[in-house]
């Protein structure tokens, strides 16, 4: 029986052994030892001392084995029960403390009830030692008990995104006796003592969901009509894919001033990790929307309100000059493009171009928001992205002559300038850098946030140089067969 007890302890000691097997094996061994003791007329609770017969050594060893097996079975059963609760399984503070208490009780029972050793002096001595250790390890014990309290309450788990006070925010990667570890958005690991965790304000971003609210403010000239400004900011919100559509983002006039009014945008993101990027993108889109409406360059400009009231965007010359695509063009060349551009006005729901359409024009958005969608093999509409003021579409089809692979629909009132091949040809002929810029734009979508999705509206780009050849071919810049020489100019 003693050999069986030792085998049970050794066989179930490795952590790789399943808890259910440990519990069952220890319980079986304990029951077997109990039957042997009962057959001998003994119980695990011996009475050792004067006036009592001293049991043989092997029987006392068997009783010691019973206490060890019973303690191990109780601890294993406790962990097996608490394992169903994810928070207890991750922290293990509660189960560890209860297991330690079970083992200490088993040790005192063996010393006093089986071996007959006096434990009063040991208890007194241990009390003094506990006081000394408590004073020496006050900080550590504070962290331990704070960890126990946090583990019992379970405000967060491993994998949750939390915020502690005003300093720390990140994902919980580890919980232990003394501290927790947070992985921040900067890929740093912060170790925070449990005593600070217990005292700090805890915000769990993962419960009940990862959704999180955010807000930004934008100053706008007080001379601008609030209704027009709110509409412009709402358009900017539509250009931020990280912002959730439900609940609906709200734009309100937060404060009035003699020179500046402040507008507040409240929104939600589906993942708390996207909040910082969503704020940054929203501010950039608000700035772009206000800029194209003439409300950003000079907040005190008296003409700003007139621009918004009339709903007129910036002049085509200024829009073209500020585009990265036309950065190498001279003011004269910009003027040529502006003169040859066709001005289009679209109502909400109208389409700028349709998938499969052969349309070799470059569309430059002056105001409004467009959704670029593609038809899936199943016949559904898949939105690839959205574009707004300052963006452009259609350069891929312009270069290759292939039908468009997507549909662009206006989500708001929109103003667009369209440049066909005839309008671009004289500028490309005079400035070959524009052809290279068109090729680079078609490949990479330079400097524009939503150009990646919009570039899918055309076929895939081929090897380097193929698109520039397409530009030269379509704009008749390549040298064809020998032309008939012109007669020389004479004096008469």
Image (spheres, rainbow, N blue to C red):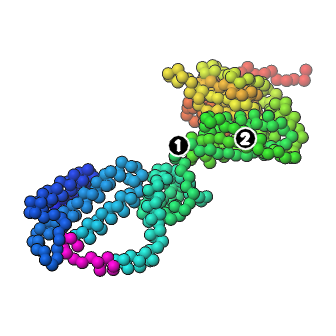
x then y, percent, for residue 390: 72, 36
Nearest-to-viewer mark from 2 and 1: 1
In this picture, residue 167 sits left or right of residue 107: right
The part of the chain drawn in magenta is 111-125
Quick one: SS at disc 2?
helix
Q: Looking at the image, which residue is at 80% across and 21% down? A: 487
In the depicted structure, whether residue 96 falls above or below residue 370: below
Residue 282's quadrant in the figure? top right
Residue 59's quadrant in the figure? bottom left
Q: Looking at the image, which residue is at 10% across and 74% down? A: 53
At label 2, counting other C-alpha atoms closer than 10 Å, the crowd grade (few under 14, some 14-19, many 20 or more) is many
In the depicted structure, whether residue 23 falls above or below residue 427: below
Q: Which residue lies under the disc numbered 1?
A: 209
Q: Quadrant of the N terminus?
A: bottom left
x then y, percent, for residue 186: 56, 55
In the depicted structure, whether residue 215 falls above or below residue 54: above
In this picture, residue 37 sits left or right of residue 372: left
Task: Inspect the magenta stretch and tell me whether residue 182 lies in it.
Answer: no
In this picture, residue 99 sits left or right of residue 460: left
The residues bearing labels 2 and 1 have C-alpha atoms spaced at a distance of 28 Å
Residue 445's quadrant in the figure? top right
Residue 308 in view (yes/no): yes
In this picture, residue 456 sits left or right of residue 59: right
Q: Which residue lies under the disc numbered 2?
A: 286
Q: Quadrant of the C terminus?
A: top right
At label 1, counting other C-alpha atoms closer than 10 Å, the crowd grade (few under 14, some 14-19, many 20 or more) is few
């Amino acid at each position: 029986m003693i050999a069986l007890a030792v085998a049970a302890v050794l066989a179930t000691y490795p952590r790789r052994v399943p808890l259910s097997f440990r519990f069952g094996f220890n319980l079986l061994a304990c029951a077997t030892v109990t039957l042997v003791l009962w057959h001998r007329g003994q119980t695990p609770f011996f009475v050792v001392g004067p006036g009592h017969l001293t049991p043989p050594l092997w029987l006392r060893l068997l009783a010691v084995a019973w206490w060890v097996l019973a303690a191990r079975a109780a601890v294993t059963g406790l962990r097996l029960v608490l394992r169903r609760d994810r928070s207890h399984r991750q922290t293990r503070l509660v189960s560890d403390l209860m297991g330690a208490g079970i083992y200490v009780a088993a040790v005192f029972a063996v010393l006093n009830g089986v071996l007959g050793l006096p434990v009063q002096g040991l208890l007194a001595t241990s009390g003094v030692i506990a006081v000394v250790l408590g004073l020496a390890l006050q900080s550590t014990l504070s962290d331990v008990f704070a960890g126990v309290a946090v583990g019992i309450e379970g405000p967060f788990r491993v994998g949750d995104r939390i915020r502690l006070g005003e300093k720390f925010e990140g994902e919980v990667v580890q919980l232990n006796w003394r501290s927790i570890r947070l992985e921040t958005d900067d890929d740093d690991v912060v170790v925070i003592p449990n005593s600070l965790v217990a005292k700090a304000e805890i915000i769990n971003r993962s419960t009940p969901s990862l959704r999180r609210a955010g807000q930004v403010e934008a100053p706008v000239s007080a001379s601008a009509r609030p209704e027009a400004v709110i509409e412009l900011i709402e358009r900017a919100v539509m250009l931020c894919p990280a912002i959730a559509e439900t609940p609906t983002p709200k734009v309100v006039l937060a404060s009035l001033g003699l020179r500046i009014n402040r507008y507040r945008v409240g929104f939600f993101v589906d993942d708390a990790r996207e909040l910082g990027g969503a704020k940054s993108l929203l501010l950039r889109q608000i700035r772009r929307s206000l800029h194209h409406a003439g409300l950003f360059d000079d907040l005190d400009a008296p003409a700003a309100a007139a621009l918004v009231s009339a709903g007129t965007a910036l002049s085509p010359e200024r829009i073209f000059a500020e585009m990265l695509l036309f950065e190498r063009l001279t003011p004269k060349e910009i003027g040529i493009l502006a003169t040859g551009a066709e001005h289009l006005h679209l109502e909400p729901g109208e389409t700028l171009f349709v998938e499969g359409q052969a349309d070799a024009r470059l569309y430059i958005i002056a105001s409004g928001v467009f959704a670029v969608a593609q038809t899936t093999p199943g016949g559904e509409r898949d939105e690839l992205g959205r574009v707004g003021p300052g963006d452009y579409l259609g350069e891929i089809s312009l270069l290759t002559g292939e039908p468009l692979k997507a549909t662009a629909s206006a989500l708001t009132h929109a103003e667009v300038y369209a440049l066909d091949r005839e309008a671009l040809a004289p500028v490309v002929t005079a400035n070959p850098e524009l052809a290279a810029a068109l090729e680079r734009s078609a490949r990479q979508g330079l400097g524009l946030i939503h150009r990646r999705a919009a570039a899918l509206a055309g076929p895939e780009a081929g090897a380097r140089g193929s698109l520039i050849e397409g530009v030269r071919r379509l704009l008749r810049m390549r040298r064809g067969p020998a032309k008939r020489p012109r007669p020389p100019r004479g004096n008469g």
